[in-house]
Image (cartoon, rainbow, N blue to C red):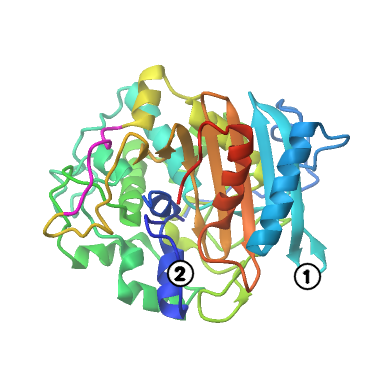
Amino acid sequence: MTRTSTRTRPGPRSGARRALLCAALLALTVQTTAAAPVLADEPGGRDGRGGHGARDCVRTEGPLDERARRVLALARQAKKDLRLKSVQLRVTVDGREVVTDALGESMTGVRARPDMHFRAGSVAFAHIGTALLQLVEERRVRLDDTVERWLPELPKADRITLRMLATNTTGLHDYVTDPDFLAELQAHPFRSWTPRDLVGYPLRHSFWYEPGTNWSYSHANYVLLIAALEKITGVPIDVFVRERVTGPLGLHDTRNGFTPEIPHPALHAFTSDRGLYEESTFWNPSWTTAPGAVITTHICDLARSAEAVGSGELLSPRSYRTLLDPGTVGLGGATEKCPASVCLPQTEAKHFGFGVIVINGWVLQNPSFSGYAAIQAYLPAERLAIAVSATKTATTPEGNMAQRVAERIAAELAPGTPLAIG
């Protein structure tokens, strides 16, 4: 769900480890009941022409204009160059569709479609960050409130704040880099993980640094933030996010789940993480974050999410500024205890914001795990949203290939502002 300033994945064991690193980290190479699934033929969501009507997520109807043809040609070439099994994409400008399409296959003989659902990992963090900033606007909490009242068993809880959890500045280790965790996950990809299971791994280690003094990515931060938010609000995280973000934005096909189920129709995924090319569609994603925040979506919702989060649609101007830089710029860097591969410099051009990544003015999230890869990216200066999902063949290169497709599209549509993630 979410990967590191290194991004790659050679042999089965190290491959599994790097593939599992959060997309956010990579980009910086720098049970309550879930809502009932909405089937593909049910109305709802943002329509294909940029409005909020009852229209399914479908391919753009022809004839295509020149810009749409160029984007599709780039996507087709990228699919070929990167040896991808499928590519789903949607591009909008100022909320209006440029092009929506799906290339390749979901499974052998089954054509990929734009309305097929896939796992969107760390995109949930952008939604959670936005919802937390709304609570701050309402003065229900402050970002610099320490968390001991909600997480009394957490070491250094009296020094760790909500801001630090949301911005990855606590100093906690990331469990997806722990060899014991990786060995268990690789051996048992269908295992269901609890938050206590997950947080137990980083708590075996001392902190990388004193909370708030450096930057390092850790999935544990959002597992803990979700636990705190559920106590603050008194509602499960899926309800909290649906009421404040996905519901108001009309993201009817974006769901927070509690099981490995993917709503129909599902885009199937395949990976070589364990040393052989195998289907991974229904591997249990509970390790990626807390129950109720493991999301699935489709490409139309992903583009709408990119636009709304990236423009601060649900936030005040002040909160939007915090989303883009909550104090992370200037942090990061190796210390005696924290290696350069972990404590990454946060610069104006490339830094982790409040549940989002900011690169050259682009606001994005880029999940990649268990054979799924995606990106939502928004350039406020051009009101340009790019959403891409990709799945692999046995010969696809390592890394998040949805990013690579999006980078090519961005270079065509916003040549002066590179989406330079890797």
Secondary structure of the residue carrying numbered label 1: loop
Q: Which mark is residue 108?
A: 1
Residue at coordinates 34% horizontally, 28% vertically from top-left?
Answer: 322
Q: Residues within 10 Å of mark 1 (few under 14, many from 20)?
A: few
126 above or below 8? above
Q: Disc 2 designates what residue?
A: 9
| Mark 1 or 2: the one toward you | 2
Mark 1 is on which residue type?
Thr
| Image side of residue 310 versus residue 100, left or right | left
Query: In the image, residue 14 lies at what x, y percent?
Result: 40, 75
| Image side of residue 160 versus residue 72, left or right | left
Query: In the image, residue 76 lies at what x, y percent?
Result: 73, 52
Marked residue nearer the N-terminal end (1 or 2): 2
Assign the magenta stretch its main secondary structure.
loop
Residue 331 painted magenta? yes
Residue at coordinates 67% horizontally, 36% vertically from top-left?
Answer: 91
* Residue 213 figure quarter: top left
